[in-house]
């Protein structure tokens, strides 16, 4: 996949390096045509997969949820004292997956990293739909989702007031802000592209793009304002990304439950979120490249190499945080903390899950030190799958597992997810892929104007 | 009547824009990519007032969050385990989030305001200017000015010069 070139490094050794990210051979019109072709030329196979995913979403996600609402939370494996189960594991996991998208866009925009341009839109789209899944999991966990407005602070006769000192309330604001900002960031970046696509599309697309581009004309004044606003959005969103997962970690860390009450949780969760987020983005890019070879022009080996290095760094940081989590628990040396660690690290099946987690998140990503693996699509695909499984297990080993060994032995109770919980978990993945696949056929998954910037601004006299 | 010059190269378009400026004409640049640095370099840096809106958006968000958290605590007193009723740390977390929420929202609104969006009255003068050409538009010109402007644009390297009738 990678076209390698050689250069001479220190001690005269030959070093093979990937070519720099260079899109200068692609014309502006070609970019428009490629992306429009990607969106409009859809084979029957795509519709079959989309239809199958829709069906699976109904069967595995919607119907079990309806069954749970009709029957009650008793159909889940939740019981005293484990009231936070797989639904909240999924909640934390999907918030993590949502992390890399907006971060790739915002952080790499501020640092003017050119290779972000081709992948930022896809990553932002992933963020949006991951957050949709996150929101649904909150409602699923609630049990009575129609009472969601109880979390709003307004005068009521129930004498139940919203407590702004609760980390769950922080979550409402953090996730709400992140969702709103991500939607704005995604749509805002798409306005010039929709205006451009409007010129070369027909039918309902033309009408849709006309309305959604809001009459964008591409004047110098509009671009100027666009650039300024984009810088402010990025500056706001970067700290927001960090705050969101810190706050999610405080849902646990601000309690006194053994296994939850750890000061390392905020950086641990943020690092883990970024690790799973980048793995999710890379997995999405790999699959898109496989099924749409036209995208190989825009998502190149260089992207794989760069993201591979980021995953490696995040994996090492995550491993350090995991070590700290265990070591600080041992250092505390309280009986309840030691019981929790014994349950997590030494009691099957959780000990096997812990080993699998370390294998997936620490050992497998170490292979990314080898450049050939970073440039290998299949290799990266499997590494990302391992990382995602590992990150899901990490949340599983924290959320319900800590509650299973809560203080006194008479409270101890093992938790196993019921078929409803497992089905909804799998269904959520189908729902996510369904939404993503439908979206990328309606809206551009690659930022046209940014890829054009990548290709360079045409100058007669040269740059 | 308007006149539009289409250019394949950004630098020739900017040369033409400079000639138009020295001839005393106001113009609008259309491009499929941002040319912010190039235009700033050619004509000097332009002011943007978005930053003030962003700042006051963030500030109003901060006060809204603070008022919401402390106001709720004041109106509906909930004593919890000896903790203070007005607790600064959790209030700051709520305020932090609302600062960002309002900051982002007001920035978007100010962008719409200064970029003149939404506006469906005028379209891009030529589809190419939204895809792969750089456009230079001089509007509200008289018939006798057309030839003069056409000459300036062609001499500067315009690939195409169009007459654009007002809608």
Image: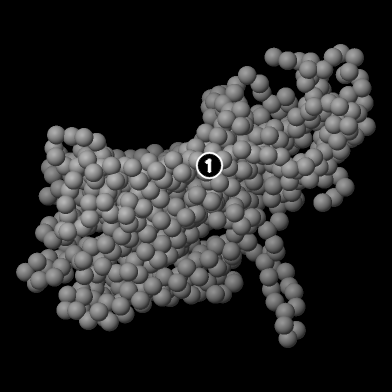
Residue A236 screen position, x and y as percent: 50, 49
User: In this view of the protein, can residue A287 be seen by the observer?
Assistant: no
| Vertical order, B20 against A321 (above or below) | above
Residue A242 screen position, x and y as percent: 43, 58
| Vertical order, A404 against A51 (above or below) | below
Q: Residue at x 32, y 74 (%)?
A: A325
Q: Residue at x 12, y 50 (%)?
A: A74
Q: Is residue A4 left or right of residue A169?
A: right
> In terms of depth relative to the viewer, which is nearer, A163 or B152?
A163
Q: Residue at x 30, y 78 (%)?
A: A328
**Could you tell me which quadrant the N terminus of chain A lies in?**
bottom right
User: Mark 1 — on which chain does it sit?
Assistant: B
> In terms of depth relative to the viewer, which is nearer, B33 or A230?
A230
Q: How is the image coloured?
A: one colour
User: In this view of the protein, can residue B103 be seen by the observer?
Assistant: yes
Residue A58 screen position, x and y as percent: 29, 40
For mark 1, give the secondary structure. helix
Q: Is residue A245 left or right of residue A122?
A: left
> In terms of depth relative to the viewer, which is nearer, A155 or B88?
B88
Q: Residue at x 13, y 61 (%)?
A: A81
Q: Quadrant of residue B46?
A: top right
> In terms of depth relative to the viewer, which is nearer, A258 or A131?
A258
Check disc 1 and report the residue beneath it.
B54
| Vertical order, B145 against B9 (above or below) | above
| Vertical order, A454 against B49 (above or below) | below
């Amino acid at each position: 996949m990678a076209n390698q070139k050689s250069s001479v490094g220190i001690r005269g050794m030959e070093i093979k390096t990937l070519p720099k990210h260079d899109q200068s051979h692609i014309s502006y019109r070609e970019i428009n045509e490629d992306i429009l072709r990607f969106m409009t030329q859809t084979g029957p196979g795509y519709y079959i997969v989309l239809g199958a995913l829709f069906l699976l979403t109904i069967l595995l996600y919607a119907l079990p949820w309806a069954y749970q609402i009709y029957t009650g939370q008793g159909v889940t494996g939740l019981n005293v004292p484990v009231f936070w189960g797989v639904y909240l594991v999924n909640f934390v996991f999907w918030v993590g997956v949502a992390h890399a998208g907006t971060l790739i866009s915002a952080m790499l925009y501020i640092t003017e990293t050119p290779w972000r341009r081709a992948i930022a839109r896809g990553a932002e789209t992933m963020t949006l739909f991951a957050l949709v899944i996150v929101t649904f999991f909150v409602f699923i966990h609630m049990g009575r989702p129609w009472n969601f407005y109880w979390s709003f602070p307004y005068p009521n006769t129930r004498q139940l007031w919203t407590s702004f000192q609760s980390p769950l309330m922080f979550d409402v604001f953090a996730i709400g802000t992140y969702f709103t900002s991500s939607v704005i960031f995604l749509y805002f970046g798409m306005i010039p592209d929709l205006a451009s696509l409007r010129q070369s599309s027909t039918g309902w697309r033309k009408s849709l793009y006309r309305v959604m581009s809001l009459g964008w004309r591409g004047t110098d004044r509009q671009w100027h304002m666009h650039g300024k606003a984009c810088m402010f959005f990025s500056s706001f969103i970067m700290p927001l990304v960090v705050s969101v997962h810190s706050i999610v970690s405080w849902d646990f860390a601000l309690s006194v439950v053994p296994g939850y009450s750890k000061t390392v949780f905020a950086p641990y969760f943020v690092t883990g979120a970024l690790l799973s987020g980048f793995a999710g983005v890379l997995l999405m890019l790999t699959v898109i490249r496989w099924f749409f070879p036209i995208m190989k022009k825009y998502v190149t080996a260089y992207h794989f190499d760069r993201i591979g290095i980021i995953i490696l760094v995040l994996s090492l940081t995550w491993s350090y945080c995991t070590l700290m989590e265990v070591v600080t628990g041992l250092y505390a040396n309280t009986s309840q903390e030691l019981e929790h660690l014994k349950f997590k690290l030494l009691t099957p099946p959780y000990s096997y899950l812990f080993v699998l987690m370390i294998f997936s998140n620490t050992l497998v990503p170490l292979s990314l030190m080898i450049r050939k693996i970073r440039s290998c699509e299949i290799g990266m695909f499997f590494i990302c799958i391992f990382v995602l499984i590992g990150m899901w297990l990490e949340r599983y080993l924290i959320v319900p597992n800590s509650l299973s060994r809560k203080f006194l032995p008479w409270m101890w109770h093992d938790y196993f997810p019921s078929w409803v919980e497992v089905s909804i978990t799998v269904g959520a993945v189908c729902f996510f892929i369904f939404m993503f696949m439908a979206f990328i056929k309606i809206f551009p998954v690659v930022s046209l104007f940014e890829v054009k910037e990548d290709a360079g601004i045409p100058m007669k006299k040269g740059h | 009547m308007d006149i539009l010059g289409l250019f394949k190269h950004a630098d020739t378009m900017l040369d033409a824009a400079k000639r138009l400026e020295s001839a005393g004409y106001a113009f609008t640049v259309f491009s499929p990519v941002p040319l912010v640095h190039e235009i700033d370099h050619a004509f000097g840096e332009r002011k943007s007032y978005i930053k003030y809106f962003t700042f006051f958006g963030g500030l109003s968000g901060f006060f809204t969050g603070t008022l919401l958290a402390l106001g709720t605590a004041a109106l509906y007193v909930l004593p919890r385990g000896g903790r203070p009723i007005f607790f600064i740390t959790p209030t700051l977390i709520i305020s932090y989030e609302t600062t960002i929420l309002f900051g982002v929202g007001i920035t978007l609104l100010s962008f719409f305001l200064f970029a003149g969006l939404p506006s469906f009255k005028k379209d891009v003068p030529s589809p190419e200017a939204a895809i792969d050409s750089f456009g230079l538009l001089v509007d509200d010109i008289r018939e006798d000015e057309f030839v003069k402007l056409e000459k300036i644009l062609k001499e500067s390297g315009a690939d195409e010069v169009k007459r654009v009738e007002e809608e």
